[in-house]
Amino acid sequence: MSQPSPRTGGINATSAPYLLYGEEISYFSAKVRCALRLKGLWFEEIRRGYPEAARRTGLAMIPIVVTPEDETWQDSTDIFDRLEARHPDPPLLPPTPCQRIAAHLVELYVDEIGLLPAAAWRWGTPARLETSLAYFTALFGPRARPSADAVIRLAKEVGVDERSRPAIEAHTHALLAALSAHFEEQPYLLGDRMSYADCALMGLASGHLFNDLEARALLLETATPVVGWIDRCNAPAGFRGEAWLDDDALPPTLHEVLRVMGTDGLPLILDAMRSFEAWADDADPTAELPRAVGTARTELRGTLIERVARSYSQYMLQRVTDAVAAIAPADRAALGVALSGTGWEPILDATATRRVRKHGFQLELEPQA
Ligand SMILES: N[C@@H](CCC(=O)N[C@@H](CS)C(=O)NCC(=O)O)C(=O)O
């Protein structure tokens, strides 16, 4: 077998490829694939990587990225940070406060709330279940059924069931309408140039919706501008524009996208925070932090949703509250104005009182001060 030859010419040239252990149908793999493409990095994708991911991280979870130096990176969010630190050009995150926080909010929405539409359109009716099982069988053969059963369990855990499905579908329609209106005017979420926000949203749009028969039909019938945007994200070199929107703007169409995400999503995110913190107040701080810490009762569009409260949700929320805290005081007022009416306003003052942190690949409770 011949050795890979060094890639020359690009600013992000490496002597060997990055390896992405991911799946076409995986939500979080789609986020990372998109960021590797945005950076113009040489990467190869390896399928059926769960055993290798588990061997390297102790977690049966994809995606992971293995660097040319054989370092292992896990967690799409942390992978974004690592890529940005090592290959700052072209950047993922805009430098200006409102667009930067908007990008973080899109990721928070995708990681915490987008899982509801994703799971509902993949597994939420007998017809969807049947076609998704066929897809899983094509990919995983005899492992399809147990793999699908595990994901169907996760779908219930995030709050998808017969009772919640109509509210989740109404939310999906509103989101696609807002995104379509935006992508009729702008190539990417923040203007001419692709960003962190696009990479995050590709998890839902490309990892799930465009991969699933009924959701793909929905996109083609009702949201073709979103389909065009997915295509641009898949081949950013040919579409790379010069700049994000001028003057740190969040134009009205993006404001509407954020409004659908925030109005519908933030109450669930804050209820998850309250459930986690109530649990943490009684928890043994020296014990291993469980992935699930009880049930969060919450509401989407007036429909009761019961979802597993996950310790990881606190990690994602903190990420945004820390990014907000890092905004210069002089810029806080502009951020408040930019987000006014989006439903995200409470996050500007939210503070996680029980924080979590990573130790290696494991989450743990931060000791209280
Ligand atoms: N926070 C992780 C989540 C990764 C994740 O949930 N990956 C899914 C596939 S898209 C998985 O492997 N799930 C297995 C499990 O949750 O047990 C990330 O952002 O990478």
Image: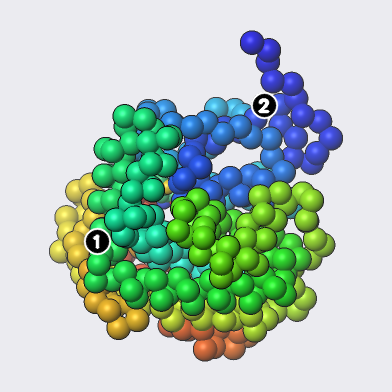
Q: Residue at x 51, y 73 (%)?
A: 175
From the viewer's perspective, is residue 350 above or below residue 46?
below
Earlier in the chain: of badge 2 and badge 1, it is 2
Kind of residue at disc 1: Val
Q: Is mark 1 within 8 Å of ligand 1?
A: no
Q: Nearer the viewer, residue 364 or 337?
A: 337
Q: Amino acid at mark 2?
A: Ala
Q: Which residue is mark 1?
A: 308
For the N terminus, the quadrant is top right
**Does mark 2 have its CB less than 8 Å from ligand 1?**
no
Q: Of 127 and 10, which appears nearest the observer?
A: 127
**Residue 132, position as x, y percentages in the image:** 38, 47
Q: Is residue 250 visible?
A: yes
Quadrant (top left/top right/bottom left/bottom right) for the C terminus: bottom left
Looking at this view, name the residue that lies furthest to the top: 1
- The residue where tag 2 is placed is 16
Locate residue 44 relative to residue 300 in the image: left or right: right
Q: Residue at x 32, y 60 (%)?
A: 124
Q: Is residue 359 left or right of residue 126?
A: right
Q: Which mark is residue 108?
A: none
Q: Quadrant of residue 33?
A: top right
Q: Position of residue 314 (x, y in %)?
A: 35, 63
Depth order, front residue of 309/148: 148
Judge the density around disc 1: few (<14), some (14-19), many (≥20) Cα neighbours within 10 Å.
many
Q: Secondary structure at mark 1?
A: strand
Report, in whole angstroms, how far the alpha carbon at label 2 lies from the one at label 1.
Answer: 41 Å
> In the image, residue 201 lies at what x, y percent?
54, 61
Q: Is 7 above or below relative to 192? A: above
